[in-house]
Amino acid sequence: MTFCLRYRFSLIAAYLLLSVCSGKAQLPLRPDAFPPSESSASTGKALLMADDSASMADWMHYPTYEHYVAMMQRFERRHPALCRLDTIGTSVNGRLILCVRLSDDNAATVAEKPQVFYSAAIHGDELVGFHLMLHLIDTLLQAYGVSPQITALLASTEVYINPLANPDGTYYGGNGTVGLSRRYNARGVDLNRNYPDPFAATAKNIEPENQAMIDYVSVHRFRLSANLHSGSEVMNYPWDSFTSAQRSHPDADWWVAVSKRFVDTCRRESPAMFTDVVNSGYIAGGDWYVITGGRQDYMNYCHDMLEMTMELSSVKKVASGDLPRYWRSQRQALINYLCEVHALPVAAGVCSSVAGRGSWRAYPNPTRGPVTVETDGRAVLLDLSGHPAGIHLLRVDGRWVRVIKL
Ligand SMILES: [Zn+2]
């Protein structure tokens, strides 16, 4: 009910369709990076820990906090031409929120490389995404120059990966174990309910982990991202704040197509995956259950990026011996999703009372109809004459541009 009222009283007006195409080529979505599947032994429900690279080598352990930091540093040290380590910020208890940027800056296959972003374990006890992201970073670095797909990806794309968004939750039991990991941050806050709610009138106190993430996203130009969770297996696309009957995302058809490709790719290895919520394996978030304060809706609504929530394992604390199984099933889909940044939807528009960001200029603004939008030196003339008064957020060349129609 609250949402209905807010929806009615906000300046939401109309959906606009734009056809401003960036004209970029799509990368191949073909598997070519991996040898035939290897087998792995089960370790029951154990959450085995590794505190050095020798123990981590089989990818059947979780790293201690210190070894996680050491792994991130070593990625950069061993691959200085491809990998740069960033610190997004620090947690309540001072642990590092790290991110690697993977790209070959000497390869210039496109004029401006799009930026794509993975972030995992905002819920500290949802461990599989954390592990998968470390394995993915390692694989992208090792396979560069070997796999045609990965070579093309890092030559044409800036890939950002934050394996651990809530380190205090994951290492709640201490730096040496993930066995006592929990959902919340050190203050007991669910970080995926703590983002600014773009549809609410009241502000909230943003936790340090989330404020750091907001600041980081604000100085980048991520176009596509995913927030990795577990507890179910389903691709959850925007919006979380509404059912699709109340309000569907303007790019819903594209989200369905991307989700289906992800699920189908995983099912080639593990046919039963992504069936525990819906048989299709994908759903509009609010049709599963409505939440507010989630990161996904905030990123879609307040930043010029498309973000979805990937729920990657029915079990939250996946036994360390089962980790290779998830990696085998999902690695190719995770790589393919990064490539999707080169084939984003080009006809979309939502309405917003929240300012966008980025380097753009629209004039006249407010307008009674015609408006020229400039992004990165490119000017596009649009006409809002046939649309109702209010604030419109237009997507032009992948950016959200805020225009007021009188
Ligand atoms: Zn979660």
Image (tube, rainbow, N blue to C red):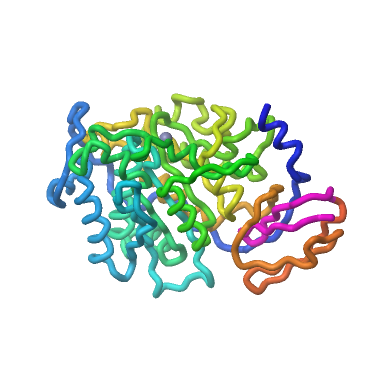
Magenta region: which residues?
387-406
Tell me if residue 192 comes above or below residue 209 in the rendering.
above
Query: x%, y% of residue 373?
Result: 72, 66
| Residue 397 is covered by the magenta coloring | yes
Nearer to the camera, 346 or 298: 298
Query: x%, y% of residue 5?
Result: 72, 32
Query: x%, y% of residue 402?
Result: 70, 57
Rendered-image quadrant of the C terminus? bottom right
Query: x%, y% of residue 250?
Result: 67, 44
Tell me if residue 296 comes above or below residue 141 in the rendering.
above
Which residue is located at x 87 percent, y 51 percent? 386
Tell me if residue 277 comes above or below residue 66 in the rendering.
above
Prevailing SS of the magenta stretch: strand
Nearer to the camera, 186 or 399: 186
Tell me if residue 108 comes above or below residue 231 in the rendering.
below
Q: In this view, does 21 lie to the left or right of 48?
A: right
